[in-house]
Amino acid sequence: MPQKLAPAISDWTQLIEQQRWQELSAVLEDTHVSDIAERITALTPKERAIVFRLVERERASEVFGYLPYGEQRELIHSLSDEEVKRVLDEMRPDDRTRFFGEMPAEVTRKLIEELSPEELKESRELLGYPADSVGRYMTPHYVFISPEMTASQAIEHIRKVGSRSETLNVIYILDTNGKLLEDIRLGSLVLADPQSKVTDIADPALVSLHAMDDRERALKLFEKYDRVALPVTDADGNMLGIVTVDDMLDVAQSEATEDIQKLGGSEALDAPYTQVGLWDMIRKRGGWLSALFLGEMLTATAMSFFETEIAKAVVLALFVPLIISSGGNSGSQAASLIIRALALHELKLRDWFKVCYRELISGLALGFMLGVIGFFRIVLWQHLHLTNYGQHYLLLAFTVWASLIGVVMFGTLAGSMLPFIMRRFGFDPAASSAPFVATLVDVTGLCIYFSVALLILHGTLL
Amino acid sequence: MPQKLAPAISDWTQLIEQQRWQELSAVLEDTHVSDIAERITALTPKERAIVFRLVERERASEVFGYLPYGEQRELIHSLSDEEVKRVLDEMRPDDRTRFFGEMPAEVTRKLIEELSPEELKESRELLGYPADSVGRYMTPHYVFISPEMTASQAIEHIRKVGSRSETLNVIYILDTNGKLLEDIRLGSLVLADPQSKVTDIADPALVSLHAMDDRERALKLFEKYDRVALPVTDADGNMLGIVTVDDMLDVAQSEATEDIQKLGGSEALDAPYTQVGLWDMIRKRGGWLSALFLGEMLTATAMSFFETEIAKAVVLALFVPLIISSGGNSGSQAASLIIRALALHELKLRDWFKVCYRELISGLALGFMLGVIGFFRIVLWQHLHLTNYGQHYLLLAFTVWASLIGVVMFGTLAGSMLPFIMRRFGFDPAASSAPFVATLVDVTGLCIYFSVALLILHGTLL
């Protein structure tokens, strides 16, 4: 347990300097909110912001309430200070979420209202919402009304306060504490009887986002409910801002782009192809390519295990590329289907067994089919005297057939399960790229092929 | 030249039965519009619709004008007739666009208003707009006002006619002929001085779509202008309907899904993974997989060309999977980057040379890098006595290095240029899937590897 220190300001400063967040947080817990409010203004902007962010949410709201308006504004600007941002950046992500949780709603609201759109873009991480969370996309340009108003009063109010008409499409009904009650389309307000109460003409079902939600959830709700904007609240249902559909269109596109780039076996470029510098591009692609190459080197190792067999029956080597690429191709297919289905939430983690079963059957059918083609290719070439595979060509053909069943089944299985495994362990499923799956399948495919060959050709070719 | 026939109704019927569209179209050209209007009502619904669709746009508008209201409605319903749809379906696509062009604006408008949303979904192809064109996505639920109105008159009008408030966000200003003049946000109307003219408060820049536009252009405009709906006009600027952003969100997602599925080397599934039947899925994947397998069989042929070399130096076979997969991986990378950049219009067809240059340099750098790793892998394994590559191991290492440069360069080049070639010849660039590129590169990679081997190892191992 941390020691109970007297809450002297010099101590706070010292703890910040030494980044002893846990102790500082404990000290603040023992300090009365009015004391915190009093002392916080004596600190430097950076210290002030950090101390405030370390105070537990409920109490921070009280601290903020104790501050006079001018001090509140100063604190808001301290929160978007460059140095505070740096402290946050330098912190380990788990520490960051542990110490810097959600801010009180009124502070968040003031923060996103006070800052210019450019500042806001830069400082959204300060709100304490993780990357790719809804909190990072919300804007403060919404109009709210109170539940007692009539339609005509509401329109009168909108005319007074509304300024950016493109975000006027939906109006939000908040109670006096800023809690989101309902939303109402401007169109409904205009069409309604002027004397009707706004609560009577509001949308029957309120759909709202939580600032901590992942942007993918937002995307899903926009797709499902065909809205142009959705309200964002904090954990207690207090309105913080709105997210508009055009931002979600960008999100949808950039998520798909990332997935496609990862699927192709490179890092996400994070910028249009033409705007990425040549060397930056080579670096982003080279990393994955080298990793895959290192993995693929196992094929050389696997091959050297079977060097004696190859020397005895060179004809076996001829089918190595065909066999392993079939495994790779079926694996890429399966992986890309599953990755996309996971991204679109068509599949959940718990569906892995169903998918596994489906893919095993698909793999069996596909492998059998390719095997048939491969079998007849060998027999045909032999009979047409295009290639001479020797007297045991039929056994060779059976070896290829059987290997293809095994390799394609393993390919589809690996390709379909790898994205699930990635997701399970918190990685992006798209990182189980086609080349990654192909590399994995190549090594296994060689082992399957030569094992089958040893089994079938033992005593004849081998 | 078609013969000039007397425009007898029996002749029209006969020409339709024999699908002699060109002649029927010529006959109609020689018939007065009032005669067409008179005779058209005597035909069966199917014939009526087809004759009307074959009349040239300008004149069809006049024919429509000649018809009394009841007959107009009947014609509209004939146009959505099952049999008419079948005739259209059976027609070759080029004939379809040649004969069944854009309908007159008033007919299109009436058609999409008269039909239920379900019927409309089914019959959109009847409008004469190609698949994936904006015309297929437009809906008739918009409100228009005339340019002489004041803001308060406009709001009064909206209150009278507006019914579906979710499409009330933007109001369109049309002239008496139905030509789209300007658009105005409902928010701007509400905020404006009630006495101001709507033309004074309209959006400064009108952004509109043409019904023939590709849906990708629509998506691009929505992204650029952050609108919730965009108006759709015919070639003459007549308002036909609107397209809403939520449809575009679906478009963005399904385009990306298609691309990812194709990139993974299968046909687009056209439905969520879980909703595609097992055998249907196997069929969709089996087609491409078999095609790739047939292509990949060339590797067996290529390998058999070098059978003597492999027999002489079995050690060469050990690196075959490593070499060809490196080509495949670098090709997949390049292909997926370029396919996405083309889909997002970051790259145009004319950029191919710039890309070619960039990718050649990238390929050189990446190939050189992988070659270095491969070289040291061989030297290291030899010195650590992990594998014995024989006395000429250094020459072998150089062979691998040089081959990797060649193979990776060819891989990036093929992967980046194939999508351009696809697009150039009117195919979907995404069809140049990762497995497709890998197969192409595998065969070439083998030839590069063994040619380099012959060059470097001649007189020693070979």
Image (cartoon, coloured by chain):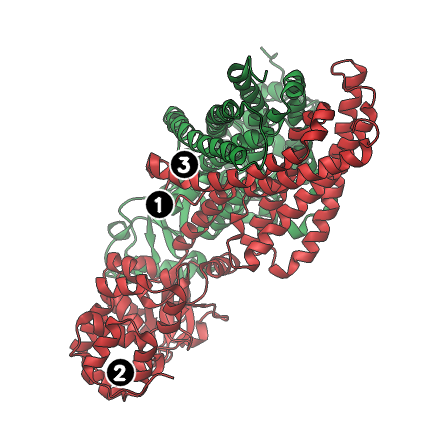
Chain colours: A green, B red
Q: Chain of mark 3?
A: A
Q: Nearer the viewer, mark 2 or mark 1?
A: 2
Q: Nearer the viewer, residue B46 or A84?
A: B46
Q: Nearer the viewer, residue A391 or A398?
A: A391
Q: Amino acid at mark 1?
A: Lys
Asked which secondary structure carries label 3, the reply is loop
B440 left or right, relative to A149: right
A398 left or right, relative to B85: right
B381 left or right, relative to A69: right
A231 left or right, relative to A266: left
Q: Chain of mark 2?
A: B
The residue drawn where x is 58% and y is 37% is A386
The residue drawn where x is 17% and y is 79% is B41
**How far from the left and from the top, in percent, is residue A355?**
39, 28
Q: Amino acid at mark 2?
A: Val
Measure the C-alpha gap from mark 1 to mark 3: 12 Å
Label 1 neighbourhood size at 10 Å, few (<14), some (14-19), many (20+)?
few
Does label 2 lie on the same chain as label 3? no
The residue that label 3 is drawn on is: A345
